[in-house]
Each structure stands twice: as structure tokens, then as C-alpha cells.
Image: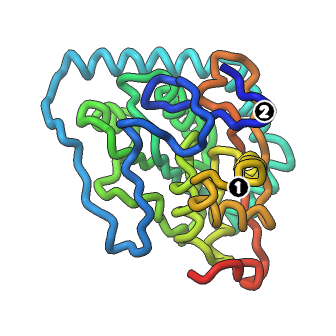
């Protein structure tokens, strides 16, 4: 179901792409990313199921390999790579890298790659980008719903699964890409709050939900709960450069629609004084 002109629709990956007109995910599998103020509140995490099922892992490996192959040969992927090689994107990328030659990628909220195709497509894109571009150094992944099987599979593709639920609060002390397609607003908000300093924000490139669409949504639905979890998102609109991607075909709409690259470029602490931290 497509979004109307008056609503913003985001697919809920917990039910394989069904639509909802509110931006935060709803339902029994809503991800456990509460609003936290301190790093001390972050908690050590491990998957609850530790069973080693080789047949299950083999089936998942086959699913991922097929998904990567499908995505790599798609017009969607070719178009996205072409966009990443344009002058506007490279200018923004080089500004984030500054004097560094590489950056790590942190993938939050990937979802269940075993049960649903959209998370598999999203992870496949991150894996393909690392293979394609030498400036991507590493892939770190976290989602509280990941199974041990999924964790082992991700590690076989060169990903490191985090053992701490950071709640999105990774401090970007060095250039970092945050890969967060279709996460909840409060997770983006947590990330920005943790890095609400000129130097740190300039270290971030973010792939995720369009901040422009959040702004449009909040302006139309002022009583939405999204408003309370979007204050840093909305404040960043003053100094964020957003480059929207093209989904090209319906096959990739569910996984990547309304997604953008975001680059932050505040030049003065005065631009960050909208709120008392």
C-alpha cells in the first residue's frame, strides 16, 4: 500500500513489510531501544538462543548468498553505486574522512535476516558496499532480536556483532558511517544526541530514513509521538546535507524507500544551542 500525500508510511520489518502510518515501529516485536541519557545505562547483550544448528545455518547462508547475488545484479544497486561516485557525494564523503583514508560502518536495527527479506537486502547492501569501496574498513552490527544463528552467519560475511546494546549512542570520535535503514526515530535521535558537538557531527555520515520527511511529518501531525523523539533530528535540519537515493524498482521499495545519505556540517557551537543537554 503506497503512502498518501498526507501520511508517511514506513514498513515494519517485524511483519515482513506491512505498512503503518506512524514512524516509530509498533507491535510486539518493537525493538528495545529506550531513551537513555548515560552510557552507563547501556547493557551487555547476547542472543538468548545458543543452539548450534548446522542445517539452519546452511539454509540461512543460502538465503543470504542468493540475496547478495540478486542485489548485486540489480539496476537499483548499479544506480546507487553510480550516485556514490558523483561529485556531490564524493565532496561530502571526503569532508567526513578529512585526513583519514577509511571509516568503519555501524549497522543498527538490521532486523531478522533469517525471517524476512527486507533485512537481508539491507545487510546485503552493506556487505556489497564494503566489497566495492576501499574507504569502508569494517562492519559492526547490532539488533537485540538477532539469534545466535544470525550472529554466526553475519560473522562469516566479515561482520562483527556487538556485545553491548549501545542504544544508538556510539560516539563518533573518528569518521564513521551509520547504516540505519528504517530504524525508529528515537534511535536516530539517540545517535545525534550522543554526538551533539561540532567535531563529532562532522565525523558522521548516516544512511537512513529521510530527515526531510520527518520534518514534514511532524509539521503535519504535531500531536504525534514522533515529535517527542525527533528533537535532535529536527534541529539538525539546519546543517544537514541530505542526498536521497532512488529505489528504481518495486523489488527494493520495501527495504529502501524514503532513504537518504545524511552529512552533518555545523560550523559553530552556537548552531547546537537549541536544547539544554
Mark 2 — residue? 82
Query: Across the whole image, how many numbered discs are drawn on residues?
Result: 2
What residue is at 65 percent from the left and 54 percent from the top? 223
| Residue marked by disc 1 | 222
Mark before the other along the chain sequence, 2 or 1: 2
Q: Are marks 2 and 1 in contact (CB under 8 Å)?
A: no
| Dot 2 alpha-carbon crowd within 10 angstroms: few under 14, some 14 to 19, many 20 or more | few
Residue 155 on image: x %, y %: 33, 38
Vertically, is 200 above or below 139? below
Residue at x-position 64% and y-position 22%: 252
Q: Residues within 10 Å of mark 1 (few under 14, many from 20)?
A: few
For this rendering, which residue is in front, 224 or 202? 224
The residue shown at (40%, 28%) is 113
149 horizontally vs 171: left or right:
left
Identify which residue is drawn at 61% across, 45% down.
Answer: 134
Q: Is residue 211 left or right of residue 146?
A: right
Task: Tell me the tag on residue 273.
Answer: none
Where in the figure is residue 194, as x and y percent of width and height?
52, 71
User: In the current view of this chain or complex, which residue is farthest to the right?
Assistant: 87
Q: Quadrant of the C terminus?
A: bottom right
State the residue lying farthest toward the front. 223
**Secondary element type, mark 2:** helix
264 vs 151: above or below: below
Q: Nearer the viewer, residue 261 or 258?
A: 258
Residue closer to the observer: 140 or 42: 42
Location of residue 150 (image quadrant):
top left
Query: For the N terminus, which image quadrant?
Result: top right
Residue 69, given in percent of the width and then of the height, sits at 54, 17
Amino acid at each position: 500500500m503506497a503512502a498518501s500525500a498526507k501520511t508517511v508510511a514506513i514498513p515494519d520489518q517485524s511483519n515482513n513489510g506491512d505498512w503503518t502510518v506512524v514512524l516509530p515501529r509498533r507491535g510486539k516485536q518493537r525493538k528495545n531501544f529506550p531513551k537513555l541519557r548515560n552510557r552507563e545505562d547501556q547493557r551487555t547483550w547476547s542472543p538468548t538462543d545458543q543452539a548450534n544448528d548446522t542445517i539452519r545455518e546452511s539454509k540461512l547462508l543460502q538465503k543470504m548468498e542468493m540475496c547478495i547475488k540478486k542485489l548485486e545484479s540489480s539496476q537499483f544497486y548499479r544506480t546507487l553505486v553510480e550516485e556514490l561516485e558523483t561529485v556531490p557525494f564524493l565532496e561530502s564523503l571526503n569532508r567526513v574522512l578529512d585526513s583519514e583514508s577509511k571509516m568503519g560502518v555501524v549497522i543498527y536495527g538490521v532486523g531478522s535476516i533469517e525471517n524476512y527479506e527486507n533485512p537481508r537486502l539491507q545487510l546485503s547492501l552493506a556487505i556489497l558496499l564494503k566489497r566495492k569501496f576501499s574507504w569502508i574498513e569494517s562492519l559492526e552490527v547490532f539488533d537485540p532480536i538477532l539469534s545466535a544463528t544470525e550472529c554466526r552467519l553475519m560473522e562469516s560475511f566479515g561482520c562483527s556483532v556487538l556485545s553491548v546494546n549501545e542504544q544508538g549512542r556510539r560516539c563518533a570520535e573518528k569518521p564513521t558511517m551509520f547504516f540505519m535503514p528504517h530504524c525508529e526515530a528515537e534511535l536516530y535521535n539517540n545517535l545525534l544526541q550522543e554526538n551533539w558537538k561540532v567535531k563529532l557531527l562532522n565525523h558522521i555520515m548516516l544512511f537512513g530514513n529521510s530527515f526531510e520527511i520527518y520534518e514534514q511529518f511532524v509539521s503535519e501531525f504535531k500531536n504525534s509521538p514522533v515529535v517527542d523523539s525527533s528533537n535532535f533530528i529536527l534541529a539538525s535540519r539546519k546543517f544537514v546535507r541530505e542526498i536521497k537515493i532512488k529505489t528504481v524498482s518495486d523489488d527494493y521499495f520495501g527495504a529502501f524507500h524514503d532513504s537518504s545519505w545524511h552529512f552533518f556540517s555545523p560550523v559553530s557551537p552556537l548552531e547546537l544551542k537549541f536544547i539544554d543537554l
